Amino acid sequence: MPAVPDPMTPHPLPGLDRVAFLKPVVTSPTIEVGEYTYYDDPAGATDFERTNVLYAYGPERLVIGRYCAIATGTRFLMAGGAHPMVGVSTYPFAMFEGAWRDATLDVVMGMPSRGDTVVGNDVWFGYGCLVMPGVRIGDGAVVAAGSVVTADVEPYSVVGGNPARLIRRRFDEADVRLMLDLAWWDWPAEQVARHARTIMAGTPADLARAVRG
């Protein structure tokens, strides 16, 4: 069987540096990316954690699953960019040294966290998406170009707009359950290679038959 791509190769396409597998290039302990998830950006795909994960000052994590396709300009806003909204002003006085910080740091530190941002497996982000803090995006979802994702996205749904709303479901409920049970993204790479055509062009039933023989 022909070799499958090495998920720890930063640039899996020879001569095309605009595409990078993210797992080998991400260094932040608060960002976790699964194998074969890639980012495409002609300005420098390997700068993803610096230019596309913003305000990651706190303990909240960004978790992205396997086999996700992330188009140019997709950004993830983390909880560190939040401003307090408990009083008259949203101005972040605690950012600055001195009396302002001394008087207000406890207000910032007491803000409730929106939690981790979690992206499932086999998720496709179109050009220029924006994902807000604490959002969870399910396996197999598609996020249309230019979308602003402010709420959780169900598995195998297509969303778009600002704020992103459901456009359609890719499969019916039974097929979604089947695909989640099959979880092809957890298979060994060689097994994925054997069934790649069915994964890409077949139905959930086709894939189930191929796997179960």
Image (cartoon, rainbow, N blue to C red):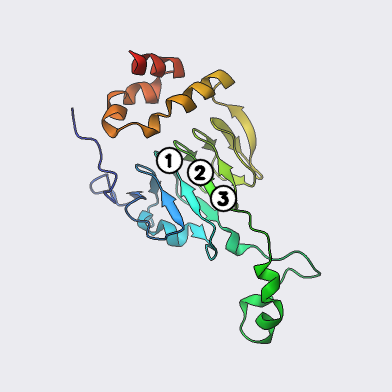
Say above or below: 48 vs 208. below
Q: Is residue 121 above or below residue 59?
A: above
Circle on res. 68: 1
CA distance for labels 3 and 1: 15 Å
Image location of residue 32, percent across then percent down: 43, 51
**What amino acid is found at the position of numbered circle 3 in the picture?**
Leu
**Mark 2 touching mark 3, by CB under 8 A?**
no
Residue holding disc 3 = 130
Please report the residue visible at 45 percent of the width from the left and 37 percent of the height from the top. Answer: 121
Viewer-closest of 64 and 47: 64
Disc 1 residue type?
Cys
14 shown above or below 109: above
Camera-side residue: 186 or 73?
186
Q: CA distance from mark 2 to mark 1?
A: 9 Å
Q: Secondary structure at mark 1?
A: loop
Residues marked 3 and 1 touching at CB (< 8 Å):
no
Residue 208 image offset from top left, x and y in percent: 41, 17
Counting from the top left corner in percent of width and height, residue 53 is at 49, 58
Is any atom of residue 17 visible in this view?
yes
Instruction: Tell me which residue sits at (71%, 71%) in the image.
Output: 107
Q: Mark 3: which secondary structure? A: strand
First in sequence: mark 3 or mark 1? Answer: 1
Q: Which residue is mark 2?
A: 119
Which kind of residue does numbered mark 2 sit on?
Val
User: Callout 2 environment at 10 Å: few (<14), some (14 to 19), or many (20+)?
Assistant: many
| Tag in front: 2 or 3 | 2
- Asked if labels 1 and 2 touch by Cβ distance under 8 angstroms, the answer is yes
Find residue 11 and name its label: none
Separation of residues labelled 2 and 3 (CA atoms): 13 Å
Tag nearer the camera, 3 or 1: 1
Looking at the rendered image, the quarter that the N terminus falls into is: top left
Q: Is residue 33 left or right of residue 188?
A: right
